[in-house]
Amino acid sequence: MTEQTPRLELEGITKAYPGVIANNNVSMKIMPGEIHALLGENGAGKSTLVKFIYGVQKADSGTLKWQGEEMVIANPNAARKLGIGMVFQHFSLFDAMTVEENIAIGISPELAAGDLKQRIRDVSQQYGLPLDPTRYVHSLSVGERQRIEVVRCLLQDPKLLIMDEPTSVLTPQEVDELFKTLRHLSEEGVSILYISHKLQEIKDLCHFATIMRMGEVVDDCIPAEESPRSMAEMMMGANLVSPEKPGKAEPGAAHLVVSNLSLASSHQHGVDLKNVNLEVRTGEILGIAGIAGNGQMELMEVLSGEMLVDDQNAVMIGNAPVGKSGPGIRRDAGMGFVPEERLGHGAVPEMSLWENAFLSGSKSMNLMSKGFININGSVDYAQNVVSEFNVKTPGVEHAANSLSGGNLQKFIFGREILQSPGVIVALQPTWGVDAGSAAFIRQSLLDLAAKGAAVLVISQDLEELFEVSDRISVICEGELSAPRPAEECTVEEIGLLMAGISHEKEAAHA
Amino acid sequence: MPEWIVPALLTIITASTPLVFAAVGEVVVEKSGVLNLGVEGMMIVGAIAAFGIGVTTGSATLAIIAGAVGGAAVAFIFGFLTLYLLSNQVATGLALTIFGLGFSALLGHGFVGKTFPGLPKLEIPFISDIPFIGPLLFGHDILVYGSVVIVIIVTYVLNKTRTGLLIRAVGENHHAAHSIGYSVNKIRMACVLFGGAMAGLGGSYLSLAYTPLWVENMTAGRGWIALALVVFASWKAWRAFFGAYLFGGITIVQLHAQGFGVEIAPQFLAMLPYLATVVVLVLISRDSSRARLNAPACLGRSFHASG
């Protein structure tokens, strides 16, 4: 076998931000046609490295060789001219514009000229990425949006395609389709830099993996020869403790009940809830799967009391009807919430940890006296949360936004759990949280249920739902499927439901 | 046909033109995601700049250029503060209006009581003499025609060209535009300067043609009307144009109605232009989902490339 010139070679890339070294002496090689995984936990420095390759950011030192030639990529336009394309994790799309306009804006003016619509159709057909250039982006599903980004890259004849967490928002079936496209590209000689922390996917797809931790390359491996667990341990540099279901009592009476709930969404491109019924019993965890943007946010708002419904009996906590009651009354009835957005919804970013602890626990933890804040009590409470839930912070007087995502999420969970809620509702509990913290959070949910609380987890992460749930429902376009015991369902079945294909409908077609 | 109709229609055109300029400029600014509440300030500085240069040099062309440059200069202060020093757009815009009113009064002190001969009319022999249509369509000054041309150009550029696509993109999602590789603040600065120049032209029209003299605070709230027109026109230049004419039209009609001695309290008549403009523009943009789509999603939000 002849020695090929690597398509991209990095040597000794170092980039420091004030107070933190994001990349320290990073070196790696990507060969033509190789699907190369970049693995690492949040904050390991993957994004910084990718931004450097794509010309968004400059490095402090180190060299980049493109097809054997040393060069500096000054900006994304220069990167695109070389043949580097990027699909962003948070899509760089414009909701109020058409697919064609979105693509035109991301490629050079010369490429955008002429019959762009036809070329979009051609490319999308060639690679199995169905896409209608005249539709507006806000009317598309997340999977379709991602196709826009991929087609945008493909129109430029890329030699290296960078994909940042491409599958976190897709159904299992959409993931399979994407992988087919990526393998097709790889056979044509396109190199792919694939960033993810979903280890099974990397094992299935990638030829080679570089593992980063704390800004440094700590290891590399051939994913096909490793297990997801062994790769996770390389990533964390420690043994992974997976959550264990504690010895279970039989679930008790229904404690959180939603009946016949329909509600129009208050969001610009939101989803209306259609006749939702659900029941969470004491001592069990009900998981709700679904692709983001299928009514999860709306369901969470209805449960937390941020959105009220006309029928007081539509939402019941124990024996208390609360459909028309706000979050305060629901907290009094023993409900705890963990919203999706940690900063700005779960916690006030600029306030200290103890102030944030006070905000949700003032009543249930008796932190008020005669209308004044009991500061010592609040600080003690926050300190308890920090020590019991392993939150890494210099002290509870530090602001919430100084914590990493995983640590803040542990703090928010701890704050809710220490109030011994009878029912807890969590939306995307481990979204963007490092593997260690995620395992910890899942364990604490299991423990809480074992103590007799009713737990509702709404998540896109199927692995997580299968790990913690006793029963699983799927939400799709605002409709909730009937729950089924977790051990009786398969990932494929849930995936089909997430895509809106139910067994009844299939049967009707047959 | 009563003989007062043609002069009345002509005054409608002169009353509407300053609003057209200011509103169309602001459409572009807001489409790029910047909320500049300083339209009134930019207009009045444009008005005194144009009047001062016009009276001093006697040249209408130089006066018009000075008006546009004056408005753009004030807009530059706004752009620099909000885009590069990340000051709050609402507060800065309000300050710009207060600053513009005061600064123009200072500059205009020596010009009080002077007059400018007005802008030359572009008369076309014979055609201008056709009854009714002749005086209505022909024989206006360059700024009146300029305002129509600008509306057509802005509509075309915003919807049909790559430049327009870029402007809409930075207004819609500035992070995405940045990550694709566009310089958000440069595009926005260009739009802010354009908006300033247009407001300056609107102001020049007031001091050069509408009432060719300098009076302190002569914009009399027109900048605010222009801002309201932009929102009610759901950020479409051609709708802002019609909104401006509707407002100008009813202003003139109610003045005439007062002259005819219509038995409605003049205070109520004076409310009419505002009321009618709001009602009509609300009606045409009543499909709220479309209106929200037209609203630039990043309007009023500062952009800083961090992380």
Image: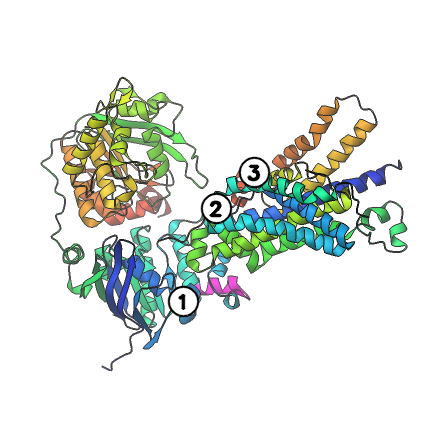
From the image, tell me which residue sits under label 2.
B298
The amino acid type of the residue labelled 3 equals Asp
From the image, tell me which residue sits under label 3.
B287
What's the residue at 43%, 70% (across, down)?
A81
In this orientation, which residue lies closer to the viewer: A379 or B168?
A379
x then y, percent, for residue B15: 74, 40
The quadrant of the image that shows the N terminus of chain B is top right
Is residue B171 rendered to the left or right of residue B125?
left
Q: Please tell me whether the stretch drawn in magenta is mainly helix, strand or loop.
A: helix
Rounded to the nearest angstrom, the CA distance separating label 2 from label 1 is 27 Å
Q: Nearer the viewer, mark 2 or mark 1?
A: 1
x then y, percent, for residue A340: 31, 40
Residue contact between numbered discs 3 and 2, judged by CB atoms under 8 Å: no
Seen in the picture, residue A86 relative to B277 is either above or below; the reply is below
For residue A116: magenta?
Answer: yes
Rounded to the nearest angstrom, the CA distance separating label 3 from label 2 is 21 Å
x then y, percent, for residue A217: 21, 63
Seen in the picture, residue B292 relative to A201 is either above or below; the reply is above
Report crowding for label 1: few under 14, some 14 to 19, many 20 or more residues within 10 A (C-alpha).
Answer: some
From the image, tell me which residue sits under label 1.
A74
What's the residue at 40%, 49% (across, down)?
A141
